[in-house]
Image (spheres, rainbow, N blue to C red):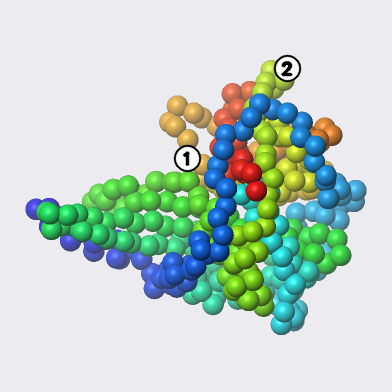
Amino acid sequence: MTNLRSVKIIMLLVSIMSLQSCALVNRFAGTKYGEAASIGGLEAPPELVTPEWEDSLEIPQTSADRVSALETYGKDIDASVAPDFIDVSVRREGDLRWLEAEIDPVNMWPLLRSFWANQGIPLERDEPMLGVMETDWIEDIDSESSGLSGGREFTATRSKYRIRIEREPNSITNIFLSERRKELQSVTEQGAVWTTVATDPEIEAEILVSLMEHVGRSREDALFEVANTQGSRLYIEMQDIDGVPVLIVGDSYSRVWRRTGMALDRANMPVIEQNRSEAYYRFTVGSLKLPAEIVLNASRYQLHLLPQGDVTLITVHAVEEASEIITPHEARVLLQQILNSYQVFRTTG
């Protein structure tokens, strides 16, 4: 009976996998990234303090830096011809790594498309006007002997990756990549049951290495830069200020802006609109998995970032055109999801 159940599980799992998924899994499974260098582990944050940072970026003063990184370039994205080599470097804050490329977003977008195409991975979202690109689910199944019983144990994971780009002055494009990961929990007659698990920043780093290769960097240089680019420690906590839940982040606005966008992606609350000069993100929660007793009154919300010197305050609100009024409990639930995603940034570079 056990063997028959195993056969059924194998057949079901194999049926849900696609040939495209193997390309990216195999591409990164054999990497030597882990041998490039060691990176410090996670550590619990100390009490909230106001660290002294030397901020290298100023808050934009114009409306030119809107979320639609490509909106000033028109819709014919494929009409541009990208150069053969892109000057791209790694930036890091805690465990948040992103790429800074010296190229206009309009020229970068076809390169991002061709990167996934070369891996054999189709795109589920391809929205250049929003600067958002997302892959289909990529599934992987592994098995190993269960010991003396002679049977085999199976594990299955599935991942999808999101790329979000932001335009900076002087033809600079910031490229942020995040992963969503699920594991197989059980197999029923209705099909496979998947559960969301924590993302792995090191897998995200592996893909950044391959993306750097795709635009012209040698793999050796990319491995070294991703492994050795240093980050900084982050301080964060949630407090109630006059009854309003607030995330207090001990860092400057420009850094918190980047981290918050990535935290929303990792928390499965995808950004649908952002405006850096007006300091807000709008996001959806339709795919957010919460306990049954927690009910959210709306499907879309808005985060506001308020710079206060060397700290930044984050609050959550209903979107402007919505009729719902967000309750403090509801705001606290959403901020807690963001706080959980911020955990990976609490490291010493």
Q: Position of residue 330 (x, y in %)?
A: 59, 28
Q: Quadrant of residue 91?
A: bottom right
Q: Quadrant of residue 251?
A: top right
Q: Position of residue 253 (x, y in %)?
A: 79, 41
Q: Residue at x 78, y 70 (%)?
A: 103
Q: How many numbered marks appear?
A: 2
Q: Amino acid at mark 2?
A: Asp
Q: Which one is earlier in the sequence, the residue at label 1 or at label 2?
A: 2
Q: Residue at x 68, y 34 (%)?
A: 235
Residue placed most toward the observer, 150 or 106 = 150
Residue placed most toward the observer, 68 or 346 = 346
Q: Are marks 1 and 2 in contact (CB under 8 Å)?
A: no
- Compared with 61, 152 (above or below) is below
Q: Amino acid at mark 1?
A: Lys
Q: Residue at x 55, y 55 (%)?
A: 38
As drawn, the label of residue 289 is 1
As drawn, the label of residue 242 is 2
Identify the secondary structure beneath mark 1.
loop
Residue farthest top in this picture: 242
Residue placed most toward the observer, 29 or 136 = 29
* Residue 105 in the figure: left or right of residue 198: right
Q: Position of residue 201 (x, y in %)?
A: 55, 53
Q: Assess disc 2: are there few (<14), some (14-19) or many (≥20) residues with their C-alpha within 10 Å of its C-alpha.
A: few
Q: Position of residue 230 (x, y in %)?
A: 68, 53
Identify the secondary structure beneath mark 2.
loop
Residue placed most toward the observer, 265 or 321 = 265
Residue 282 in view in this figure: no
Residue 89 in view in this figure: yes
Alpha-carbon span between mark 1 and mark 2 = 29 Å
- Compared with 157, 112 (above or below) is below
